[in-house]
Image: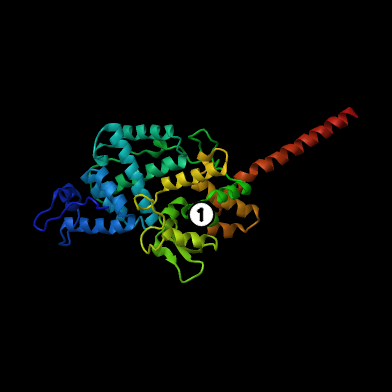
Amino acid sequence: MTTHLPDHPATQPDAFSTALEPAHRALPSPGLPAHRVDAAVAHQLMADIGAERLDTLSRTLDRTTFGVVLHWLSSYQRRSLDTKRGYADDICRIAEWFAAATGRTPADLLNAMTFDTVTAWSLYAKSKGWSARTQRRYLSALSSLFDHARRAHRLAVKNPVHLPTHAPPIGTSTNGRPPGATRVLELPEVAALASACSSHEEHLVFELLFTQGLRESEVVSLDIDNLDHAHVPPVLSVARKGGRWVRRRLGDAATPHLTAYLDGRSTGPVLVHPETGLRRDRHQLISITRRLARHAGLREPRKVTPHVLRATAITALLDKGKPLQEVQEWAGHANASTTRGYWERRNSVQRDAALSATLTADLAQAAADLAG
């Protein structure tokens, strides 16, 4: 796909560069024209987040916002490619909502986004049943963009995001479910899900989400260059949160499916849409797990998301008595409390039931003593 980046004539800055003039005038110039810097940043970002995302940003955002987004995503504060891609997706979706809600196209977020607009977005997010964590992620991305525009580019903008007002606290319910109620499948349900896989892609997705326990964002970010075929089965390099890389060996059963699915492809993303040939995104991954859940006959298949498979894998390992520290490292959690939380939420019902049963038995014994 051809990214809609503006041409940059050698003799004078174009409209894109002009839109960024306030930012560049405030910074010392090393002698390199501003539009040349913008072009270099854009092309590096194309390699980092992909031409499709960059094209969507350029078409969805006005020039000023797009220019700031380029430098914001390229900042060393966002070293992880996964973070860059996630932030790009989040800003695109906010811009698409903004354009639909206000009729302003392209979306001039930095000039027109207000406190009330963010409030309207929060109500929209709540109506969609998004979790508190998801809402906060979107709002944090938007807030970070405004802070970057104000501090790094010296633009006269005011951050419209007020997290205490606009974002529900982590651990609260926004969609009618109890807080922390991530669904965990039983192993027979997982086996049914695995049996429902019919295509090479479905087998590969199941391997990466459950057997390898990867996050959905980590799965869709995988590139063929991350595969080391010098080992059998192949070893996969995965970019985790914080920019840390880990190496994981694929399972024997998944290797033939990987080979058949790639079908000779030697570069580009691992998972691609069969019609467009473009990188799969996390929303398409959700569609795959829901489809597998339907074919497997699982109850409430719409609630079987990629995160459900990952949460099930983590919980199953802890149920088997695997050391917490090893499972934490395998899952890529920064804190052991996050890993422990999966197991504790699952087993709290059994523990509480046992304690209640003890009280019931003690009460029955006391009643029998009184009667005697």
User: Residue at image x 39%, y 33%?
Assistant: 124
Answer with left or right where residue 41 lies relative to residue 211.
left
Q: In this rendering, would 228 be left or right of 349?
A: left
Between 33 and 211, the residue placed more toward the observer is 211
Residue 327 image offset from top left, x and y in percent: 57, 57
Is residue 132 something that shows in the picture?
A: yes
Asked if 47 appears above or below 298 in the picture, the reply is: below
**Dot 1 amino acid type:** His
Residue placed at 50% from the left, 37% from the top? Answer: 172
Q: Position of residue 287 (x, y in %)?
A: 45, 44
- Picture residue at 35% right of the left edge, 32% below the top: 120
> Does dot 1 land on a helix, a strand or a loop?
helix
Please determine whether, in this image, residue 301 is positioned above or below residue 321. Answer: above
- The C terminus lies in quadrant: top right
Of 308 and 333, which appears nearest the observer?
308
> Is 65 situated left or right of 221 in this image?
left
Residue 283 figure quarter: top left
Label 1 crowding class (10 Å Cα cut-off): few <14, some 14-19, many 20+? many
- Judging depth in this view, the residue of 253 and 236 nearest the camera is 253
Q: Residue under circle 1?
A: 203
The quarter of the displayed image where residue 49 is located: bottom left
* Image side of residue 196 versus residue 83, left or right: right
Q: Where in the figure is residue 33, as x and y percent of width and height? A: 15, 58
Q: Residue furthest right?
A: 372
Task: Give above or below for 266 relative to 304.
Answer: below
Q: As rendered, which of 107 and 155 lies closer to the eye?
A: 107
**Percent x, y for residue 190?**
58, 49
Residue at the farthest top position: 371
Evaluate whether residue 337 shows in this view.
no
State the residue at coordinates (42%, 38%).
Answer: 167
